Every structure is written in C-alpha cells, then in structure tokens.
Image (cartoon, coloured by chain):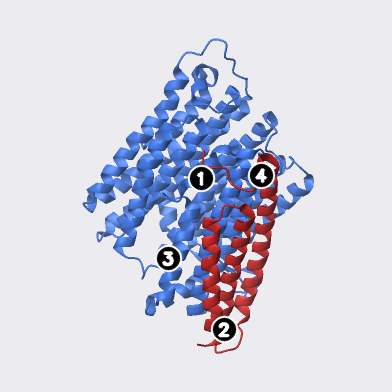
Amino acid sequence: MFDPIPWLILLPLAWGCLAFLAGVGRGGRLAFAGLIIQLALTIVLARQIAMEGARHYAVGGWGAPLGIDLYVDGLTGVMLLLIHVVTLPLVVYARAYFSCQAEGVGYFWPLTLFLLAAMNALFMSADIFNIYVTLELLSLAAVGLVAAAGSAGPIAAAVRYLLVTLLGSGAYLMGVALLYGTYGSVSLTVLGPLLAATEISAAVFLAAMLMLTGLLLKTALFPFHFWLPPAHGSAPAPVSALLSALVIKASFYLILRLWFDLFAPLVTIPVAQLLGGLGAAAILWGSVLAFMQVRLKMLVAYSTVAQIGYLFLLFPLMMLPIPEAAESALQGGMMQLVAHALAKAAMFAAAGVMVLSAGKDDIALLSGMSSHLPLTLFAFALAGVTLMGLPPSGGFIAKWLLISSAVNGGQWGWVAVMILGGLLSAAYVFKVLCQAFLPPVAGVKFKPVRRVLEWPAFLLALISLLLGFRSGEILSLLGGG
Amino acid sequence: MSSALIYACTGAALFVFGVTGLILLSHLLRKILAFNIMGSGIFLVLVGLGQRSGTPDPIPQAMVLTGIVVAVAATGLALALVRRLLHFTGEIRLPEEP
C-alpha cells in the first residue's frame, strides 16, 4: 500500500530547497505544482484514516525509542487537509500579489514551503521532543516571512515575534527536559499511560505549566497577544493570511493534543476555567480593539486575537460532567478552528487587494471600494459572516455547538460572552463595509488590480460559508481517529 | 546532593536568569545573550536529569546536540534581524509599541 506520510514532509522540504536554489522571488510555479500533489496526498491519507483509523509510522523502519515515530489520527487528518486547502488558493493569490508589488517577495516561496513542511511534520509528530524541533522550524520560517518586507516596521515586528516565540519554545523545552528526567521517555504514547498510572510529582506539574505557558505565548492568547497585531498587520498580505490562518493554529493544536493525551490526569476545573476566562477576555478585548483600529490590516489582525478566544472556550466546556455537552464543545472548537482559518485567510487576502488598490492601508480611504472591487468586498463580507457566526457558515455551526454545549451544562456566562463577541465582530466588519459603500471621494483614484487577485479570496470565503453544509464529514473524520 | 542534581539545579538557575534577562533587558544584543543562557540552562537540566544512576544517557545528549543546532540558527537569524533594525533606526532597541 502506498503510504503518503513520509512524502508529506519530504516533498515540501524538497520544493523549498529547489525554490531557494532558483533564486530571489522565484519558485511560485513550483509551489503551485507541489501543493496540488500534496493536496492529493493529504486526501489519500484522510481517506485511509477515515477507513482504517489512527496509526503509527516508524521513520526509516526505526521505531521509538531509537528512531522517530510519526502518528496520524482524525485530528491530524483534519489539520493536514485544512492547511493544504487554505494554502493552495493563497499560492495563486501570492503569485499575482507579488507580480503587482514585488516588495517583500524575497525568499517568500522557499520560506512558505519550509513552513508547510514544518507544519506537516508537527501535526504528525508523536514525541514531545520532535514537536519542539518542528515548532522551532515553524517559528523561524514564520519570522523570516514577516521580516521579508524589509522596512523598519516589519523588521521590528519580526524581532519582537522572534523573541516571544523563542521564549515560548524555551519554556516548552524546559518542560520536555523535566518530563524526560522524570519518566525517561519523550514518546506521547509511552508518557500518557505513565502519567495516568503514577503519582504526579512537583517536577511534572512544573513541566506541564511551562509547556502550556510556552504554547499559550505562541498562540497569542490574551494577555500574550501583544506581539501578534504588529507582526500580522505589517507583513505582506499573503504572509499575514498564512500566519493568521494557520501558524497560530499549530500551537493551539499542540495545546489540545497535550491537554488530552498527556496531561489529562493533571487538568483540573479551575485551570480549565482560567483558560476559558482568558479566552473570554480575548474575545471582548480583541473585538473592541479591532473596532478602534484605523488601519484595515490591523483591524483584521485584532480580529484574530478575538477569534482565538473562542477556541479556548472549549476547555471549560469539555470539563462539564454531561458527555453530550463535552462532545459538542470539542466539535464546536474544532469547527471554529477550521472556519476561522478559512475566513481569516480570505479576509487578509481581500484586505490586501483593497490596500493594494487604494495605495495606502487606511480604512478612511476605502470609500467607493464597493463599485471598484465588488468581488473582493463581497469576499470580505462573506468572511465576516463566518466570523460573526451567521448561518449557514462554518462559524455558525461552531458557535452553535459551543453555545448548545454551554446551555446544556447551564454555563450561562460563556453563552453571554459568545453572543456579545458575535455582536462586536459584526460591529467591526460593518465598520469596514459601511466605509466601502460610501460614494467615492472626488479626485481619489483607485489603482486597477488583476482579476486573478480577487478570486482566491472569494473562493476561500465561499468555502468557509459552505462549510456549514459539509460539517458532518469533518466531524466524522475527527471522530474516526 | 548527587552530581546529577547539582547539574539540574544549576541549569534551572541559569534558565531563570535567562528568562528574566530576556523579558527585562531592553538592549537587543543582551536579549539574544539572555536567550542563549536560557538555552544552556535547559540543556544542563536535560543532560543532568537524564543520567540514570551515574551513567550518562545518550538520548538526552543527542537531544541537546539538536537543541544547540536550533539555538545557533535562531541566534543567527536574530543577529541578522537586529543588524537590519540598526541600519533602519540607528538603535539596538525595539521601538515602543505603536
């Protein structure tokens, strides 16, 4: 049987090296062809997982503890499909974007491909040290992408991002060291039962706290969100879309994995409540700040801070004693992850086109955009529908599942936060739309943009909207592992 | 106190120094040095706690080697970025939050 697992890591690495050798600004066509192959491989893998369930893969025939073990299950399948479905339209978008504005193209293609290789490896890793290495690969590639624009603002944002992410992975690695010192293993499959069977020592408790804090820092959960808006808001639009849609989801995925597979015996209701509380604060604070922004891309970046908050509401809801409520909380959280990735990629892509056309990143300059770029504005609005959580979007299913779980468990506080968050996101989306529907200011000329720039954002927004109809498949793949 | 524990405690102290420096210092070169001290602390804990009854365990040593490679790459990237920042702003500090 053909096994796509090793190829999903090897191929993007190979494409990345080739794109690097091709030189500055080259490799777009290669990335497009490569991504089509990888998307096909991911679909094959997802079908295998759906039919045969989760499985291990020993790299080079050397299993753990000597070699490196990879592991795929339903959650991995969903994440792999998601990153390829989001990246493929963004590749088309980035090619067109950089042909209009060459600034920032630099080593975009090799770095993007290395980023993909790191994410694929991260989602399939089965030991906590391998996860550390892939996390670092991911961060270094992401920092390189932010810095590619080259002027003072993006460089400062990249330095801040690099320092934060190094601190985060340092804390994570310290946790790994303490766990290895206690149990003598780094494999998730070995450590999980060991933690459940033995008495938890102070060192293990400390390790869990360090690893969790490090990952929260990288996920930019409130109050660790300070680095995200400058980094995501000042990068070129295709980079912002990749980072906001996918990179922060990688560290969230790890929190989820460790929370359930490794630290399940340690987690207590107060810790889960704390995470949920931080999530709620992120929703409200991020939405209010998004509404107050004057730059379009900063508005979208703060909206990411808010939407990350919803993901963390699943932790307190998962602790509910009612099984149905806990299950729909997990499903809602995963739907939110998928829907937000698609919608945010679409929103950043659309914002990039509008900024390119207006010549400057300023919401006040958007007057008249509705008649100049109707398709792009439509894509922005559709993505906004998902963020607000209106039917039939994927965001609606996500928020519906989360709210019904909270109602089931009688947790009315979370319900209020989610409804208020939805209203606030409507406020900042409509702030942009209202400005765009104003009549054009006399004398202001929009630059014409290529049509191919407009379609990827629209496609992504459409997928995020129609996700609501196909959520059953995603949830069954999730449960299949 | 066994030698393994001495290594681990020294490592933990270095880690705390490094984290404190990384957060509190404002000069970027010092921040990068603090990151390296933090890394060395982690590596000491890995090797120190990894010893089983006095015999060195090869697995954490291999991990530390990998960690050193990652730390060198990160330091290189950080230094390159800081040089670019110096070129643009004339300062080796992060500008205040906008």
Element at badge 2? Answer: loop
Residue on which disc 3 sits: A209
Counting from the top left corner in percent of width and height, residue A12 is at 66, 52
Chain of the residue that carries numbered disc 2 in the rendered image: B
Element at badge 3? Answer: helix
Residue on which disc 4 sits: B85
Q: Residue at x 57, y 31 (%)?
A: A352
Q: Is A235 drawn above or below residue B30 in the view shown?
A: above
The C terminus of chain A lies in quadrant: bottom left
Question: In the rendered image, what is the letter of the chain coloured blue?
Answer: A
Residue B51, which numbered label?
A: 2
Measure the C-alpha gap from mark 2 to mark 4. Answer: 43 Å
Element at badge 1? Answer: helix
Measure the C-alpha gap from mark 3 to mark 2. Answer: 24 Å
The earlier-in-sequence mark between 2 and 4 is 2
Counting from the top left corner in percent of width and height, residue A14 is at 71, 54
Chain of the residue that carries numbered disc 3 in the rendered image: A
Measure the C-alpha gap from mark 3 to mark 4. Answer: 34 Å
The answer to which quarter of the image holds residue A437 is top left
Callouts 2 and 4 in the same chain? yes
Neighbourhood count class around disc 3 (C-alpha, 10 Å): few under 14, some 14–19, many 20 upward: some
Residue on which disc 1 sits: A228
Residue type, label 1: Leu
Residue type, label 2: Gln
Residue type, label 3: Met
Counting from the top left corner in percent of width and height, residue A286 is at 41, 41
